[in-house]
Image: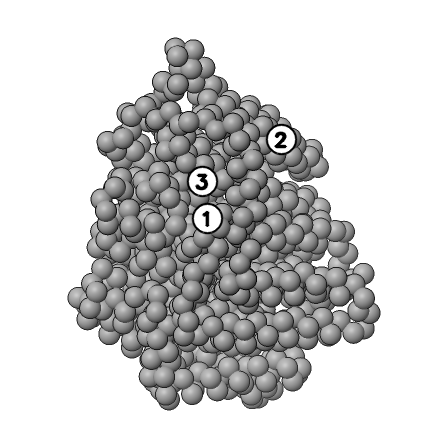
């Protein structure tokens, strides 16, 4: 038996998603930005599982499975890139990345 | 397992198997003969093109209604495979010259093309999400292909972070749409909306979040910040491919989702699309004017062109013009694709062997040294501007016409005025090439020259006989998206 | 029944605190550790939502693999991050304002939804959930296609990560 209204889960995931989005936008460190991205993905996962539970429908849970696969693929590529930049430049501050621009 | 399901996705499945095999085969090809890998990659794309065009005219859904193959998906798949082919031709010479010839390029490019094709055939949000990732992740890596070069890795990490950010929006939007309609299949969503069981507030936020996510992908203002850095940092052939591939895939998803799943919401979204389109056209064109680097200039120009195409999504709610406006978006995607690939081919030929930045000034005197390249570039710049009788003119003509038919005259006027602004920076390139004295060196590889000349011819021919392409685009909508 | 609510509230507070700290603490390694706490909190919520399998997967994949990789990356690059200087970028105030607006709109609309205060229906808990999951992942009429696409996605990411992670020396064309 479940006694927690849907809105609790939805608001919690909305707050988490917004926090993640704020983190991506305001932080300068790519690793912290990446961690904030994981918060956004987890907020979406929580929404999927909550709705899945509410509808008694497993399709939402299966979506979570694929999100985890995608997150694993992204972590591999993203961290490889971050480490590669560190190797060539020894700084990973996104604002100091100004080789680009004129 | 039913064979018909597999047959529906035969082109995509073939391409994925080919790409995986290519990874293996490449191990047995000696270092001096890496051209074979390039040829094999191109052959895979050519066969895929044949397979996919064989599906023209049929309509079938498969895998539990998750994919639908219709003329719309075939049309766009053709565009993606052709773009991939051109990218391989340009890349082979350019990558050897700049010392980054890595054979992983070919497999990753093929994976990305397969993801784009899957995106154009997606009929379920789960496939939209996975196809988005399948096309993006290889692109992040391709953008970082020249990785010891600082700019390339920087561009790649920015592309990666912003791309994953966009995926986050798509994902959360999908979650809310799932909550609103209890399903993720586009047909199911539409049925749920029509029967009134859908929860509208959730649906509207979900759709808006999807729109934000895809706006990042097509580089619409205000979600365009990543574009100049990525276009400048990535190797030029990759940028050429990305500038049409990722954009067309984003528009494919937008058109599919908004015309198939949310036709009833299209009216509410029309003002949002209109504002996005207007902003994108103006900001893209104005920012391009002051660019010194030709790569950054083309990046802003690609933003502006996304704005023109967005204009076609505004009148989707009006059934009398929806078909025409979607067809004009498809037409413009093809025209823009040919032109941008051509422009990037010329830049690939001109850029220094260190693969660093190329300024507009670096093109000066090109006409004397390399008359064919300069002539081709002239065609591309004129087509971008929209000078008749080149293809770009007709692309814009159809877009502006449907905007006016749909009652968005203001938008068409904004488009027209911003096109006038764009003439300034496009024509500056031509002036540089023909009226400035300098030694512009460029690659003399025949492959890249032939590619540029063929693309220029295509721009001319499509400009002289424009109705054929538009009719084809109309047919592409006839048996699926309408 | 009350126990459920107590557990939910405690977990929610922990998750939110951890999430706030992830985006606000200056030291990367602290942020990574707070991220692990937030991810663990989500796993607890999955249990409350009767998705025990995904709670386990969350712990194994997110905490066991992804978070650990993040910590590796933090360790590898920590010399570059002296953790001093401004942590926020130039647009932070504007960005925060936009994000808060986004949040207001999100919650406002979520709460205006009629079903928001419904209690979830109690689904018949199927003892064979994992069996069903496995079968639907390999059934062409289920989720076979996304499953295959996901596997190709992992292959592409693997190739790419190896390529990027390999030692590159300038001017060296091919090894």
Mark 3, Cα crowd under 10 Å, few <14 / some 14-19 / many 20+, is many
**Element on which disc 3 rests:** helix
The answer to whether residue B435 is above or below residue C140 is below
The residues tagged by marks 1 and 3 sit, at their Cα atoms, a distance apart of 10 Å
Chain of the residue under the numbered disc 2 shown in the image: C
Label 2 sits on residue: C60
Q: Position of residue B419 (x, y in %)?
A: 32, 72
Rounded to the nearest whole Å, what is the CA distance between mark 2 and mark 1? 23 Å
Residue at mark 3: chain:
A
Question: Which is closer to the viewer, label 1 or label 3?
Answer: 3
Q: Which mark is residue B166?
A: none
In the rendered image, residues at marks 2 and 1 fall on the same chain? no
**Circle 1 residue:** B126
Identify the residue position indicated by label 3 in the image.
A59
Judged from the image, the secondary structure of the residue bearing numbered disc 2 is helix
User: Of the residues tagged 3 and 2, which is closer to the observer?
Assistant: 3
Residue B343 seen in the current view: no
Q: Position of residue B5 (x, y in %)?
A: 51, 60
Where residue B360 sits in the image (x, y, percent)?
51, 72
Q: Quadrant of residue C7?
A: top left
Q: Measured along the vertical axis of the image, is residue B132 above or below residue B90?
A: above
- Taking the spot 75% from the left edge, 71% from the top edge, the residue there is B34
Looking at this view, is C171 or B218 the one in front?
A: B218
Q: Report whether mark 1 lies on the same chain as mark 3.
A: no
| For residue B45, above or below residue A41 | below
Q: Is residue C151 visible?
A: yes
How are the colours assigned in the image? one colour
Question: Which residue is most to the front?
Answer: B2
């Amino acid at each position: 038996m479940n006694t927690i209204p849907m809105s609790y889960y939805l608001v919690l995931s909305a707050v988490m998603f917004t926090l993640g989005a704020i983190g991506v936008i305001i932080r300068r460190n790519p690793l912290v930005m990446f961690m904030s991205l994981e918060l956004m993905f987890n907020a979406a996962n929580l929404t999927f599982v909550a709705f899945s539970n509410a509808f008694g429908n497993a399709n939402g849970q299966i979506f979570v499975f694929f999100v985890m696969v995608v997150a694993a693929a992204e972590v591999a590529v993203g961290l490889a890139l971050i480490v590669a930049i560190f190797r060539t430049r020894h700084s990973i501050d996104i604002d100091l990345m100004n080789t680009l621009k004129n | 397992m039913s064979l018909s399901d597999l047959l529906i996705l035969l082109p995509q499945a073939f391409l994925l198997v080919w790409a995986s095999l290519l990874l293996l085969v490449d191990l047995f090809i000696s270092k001096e003969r890496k051209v074979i890998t390039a040829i094999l990659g191109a052959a895979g794309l050519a066969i895929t093109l044949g397979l996919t065009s064989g599906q023209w005219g049929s309509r079938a859904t498969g895998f539990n209604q998750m994919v639908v193959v219709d003329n719309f998906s075939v049309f766009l798949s053709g565009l993606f495979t052709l773009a991939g082919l051109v990218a391989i031709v340009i890349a082979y010479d350019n990558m050897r010259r700049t010392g980054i010839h890595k054979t992983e390029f070919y497999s990753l490019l093929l994976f990305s093309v397969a993801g784009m094709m899957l995106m154009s055939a997606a009929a379920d949000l789960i496939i939209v999400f996975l196809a988005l990732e399948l096309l993006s992740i290889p692109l992040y890596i391709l953008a970082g292909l020249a990785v010891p070069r600082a700019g390339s890795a920087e561009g790649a990490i920015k592309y990666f972070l912003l791309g994953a950010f966009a995926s986050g929006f798509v994902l959360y939007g999908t979650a809310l749409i799932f909550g609103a309609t209890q399903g993720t299949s586009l047909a199911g969503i539409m049925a749920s909306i029509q029967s009134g069981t859908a929860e509208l507030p959730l649906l509207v936020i979900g759709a808006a979040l999807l729109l934000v996510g895809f706006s990042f992908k097509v580089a619409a203002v205000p979600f365009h910040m990543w574009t100049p850095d990525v276009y400048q940092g990535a190797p030029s052939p990759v940028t050429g491919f990305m500038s049409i591939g990722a954009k067309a895939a984003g528009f494919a998803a937008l058109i599919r989702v908004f015309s198939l799943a949310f036709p009833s919401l299209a009216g509410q979204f029309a003002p949002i699309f209109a504002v996005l389109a207007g902003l994108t056209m103006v900001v893209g064109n104005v920012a391009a004017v002051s660019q010194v680097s030709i790569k950054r200039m083309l990046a802003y120009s690609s933003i502006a062109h996304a704005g023109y195409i967005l204009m076609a999504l505004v009148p989707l709610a009006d059934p009398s013009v929806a078909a025409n406006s979607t067809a004009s978006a498809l037409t413009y995607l093809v025209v823009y694709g040919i032109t941008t690939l051509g422009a990037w081919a010329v830049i690939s030929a001109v850029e220094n062997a260190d693969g660093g930045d190329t300024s507009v000034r670096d093109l000066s005197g090109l006409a004397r040294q390399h008359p064919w390249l300069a002539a081709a570039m002239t065609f591309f710049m004129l087509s971008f501007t929209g000078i008749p009788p080149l293809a770009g003119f007709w692309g814009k003509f159809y877009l502006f016409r449907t905007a006016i038919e749909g009652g968005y005259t203001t938008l068409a006027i904004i488009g027209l005025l911003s096109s006038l602004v764009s003439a300034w920076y496009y024509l500056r390139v031509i002036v540089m090439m023909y009226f400035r004295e300098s030694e512009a060196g460029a690659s003399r590889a025949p492959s890249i020259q032939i590619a540029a000349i063929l693309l220029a011819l295509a721009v001319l021919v499509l400009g002289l006989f424009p109705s054929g392409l538009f009719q084809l685009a109309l047919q592409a909508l006839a048996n699926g998206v309408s | 029944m009350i126990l459920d609510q107590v557990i939910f509230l405690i977990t929610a507070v922990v998750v939110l605190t951890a999430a706030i700290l992830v985006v606000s603490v200056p030291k990367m390694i602290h942020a990574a550790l707070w991220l692990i706490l937030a991810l663990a909190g989500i796993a607890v919520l999955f249990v409350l939502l009767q998705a025990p399998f995904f709670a386990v997967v969350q712990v194994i994949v997110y905490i066991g693999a992804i978070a650990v990789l993040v910590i590796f990356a933090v360790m590898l690059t920590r010399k570059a991050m002296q953790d001093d200087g401004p942590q926020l970028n130039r647009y932070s105030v504007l960005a925060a304002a936009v994000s808060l607006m986004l949040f207001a709109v999100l919650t406002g609309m979520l709460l205006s939804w009629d079903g928001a205060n419904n209690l979830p229906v109690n689904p018949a808990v199927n003892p064979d959930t994992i069996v069903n999951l496995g079968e639907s992942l390999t059934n062409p009429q289920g989720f076979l296609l996304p499953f295959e696409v996901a596997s190709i996605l992992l292959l592409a990411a693997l190739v790419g990560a190896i390529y990027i992670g390999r030692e590159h020396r300038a001017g060296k064309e091919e090894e």
